Amino acid sequence: MVYLQLFIEFFQIGLFAIGGGPATIPFLMDIPNRYDWYEVADVANMLAVSESTPGPIGINMATYAGFNAAGFLGGIVATFSLVLPSLIVIILIAKLLDNFSKNIYVQSSFGMIRPAVTGLIATAVYGIFRTALFTDAAGEFQFPIVLVIVCMGYFALMNIKKLKKIHPAFWILCGAVMGIIFKM
């Protein structure tokens, strides 16, 4: 039964998460309200693991969540069901590409989908920000000034023009090193 639930949930996420991996985050944050597969606080860990492993973030997060819920096979089911809607849509679009791209209704639809996707991603960013910095493992509010200062420092550094060219893996590694230093 858990495999069917995983399939349905992640198929729906794949169907509606237009905008890529970050757009899946609001859906992933909603799953703990209905299932005991993981806690809302785990989404920050899922995001960290997904960002630091090769591959698309949405697929990595689906694999992580599915594995957490039902082991190896659960990871496969969640990943496959997340990708399936895109595969179906791509096949359909390829068949109708010429008519599809020139249709005024389709162009208008995509014009209005972009702000909706931006809102989904902004909600996800806010949720991860709040969870990662201001929620402890039990889901209770906290205000760790060190984490807030470190986050603001990273944000400032990554927006310096010369530092924007540094690979994201460097920043993740710096975060890991800082985590070790602050736990000593």
Image (tube, grey):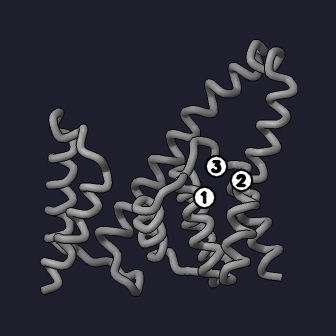
* Residue named by callout 2: 83
Which is more foreground, mark 1 or mark 3?
A: 1
* Residue named by callout 3: 17
**Disc with the residue nearer the chain's start (1 vs 3):** 3
Is disc 2 placed on a helix, strand or loop?
helix
Query: Label 3 crowding class (10 Å Cα cut-off): few <14, some 14-19, many 20+?
Result: many
Is disc 1 placed on a helix, strand or loop?
helix
41 sits to left or right of 12: left
Which of the 4 quarters of the picture holds residue 146?
A: bottom left
Is disc 3 placed on a helix, strand or loop?
loop
99 sits to left or right of 110: right
Q: Which residue is depicted at the point 49% across and 47% down?
A: 121
The CA span between labels 1 and 3 is 12 Å
Label drawn at residue 131: none
The CA span between labels 2 and 3 is 11 Å
Label drawn at residue 59: 1
The CA span between labels 2 and 1 is 8 Å
Q: Position of residue 94 (x, y in %)?
A: 81, 28
Which is more foreground, mark 2 or mark 3?
A: 2
Q: Which residue is depicted at the point 29% across and 61% down?
A: 172
Query: Label 2 crowding class (10 Å Cα cut-off): few <14, some 14-19, many 20+?
Result: some
Q: Position of residue 165 (x, y in %)?
A: 24, 38
**Badge 2 vs badge 1, beta-carbon distance below 8 Å:** yes
Image quarter where the N terminus lies is bottom right
Tell me the amino acid under the disc marked 2: Val
Tell me the amino acid under the disc marked 1: Ile
Up-down relation of residue 123 to residue 47 (above or below):
above
Q: Position of residue 59 (x, y in %)?
A: 60, 58
The residue most toward the front is 54
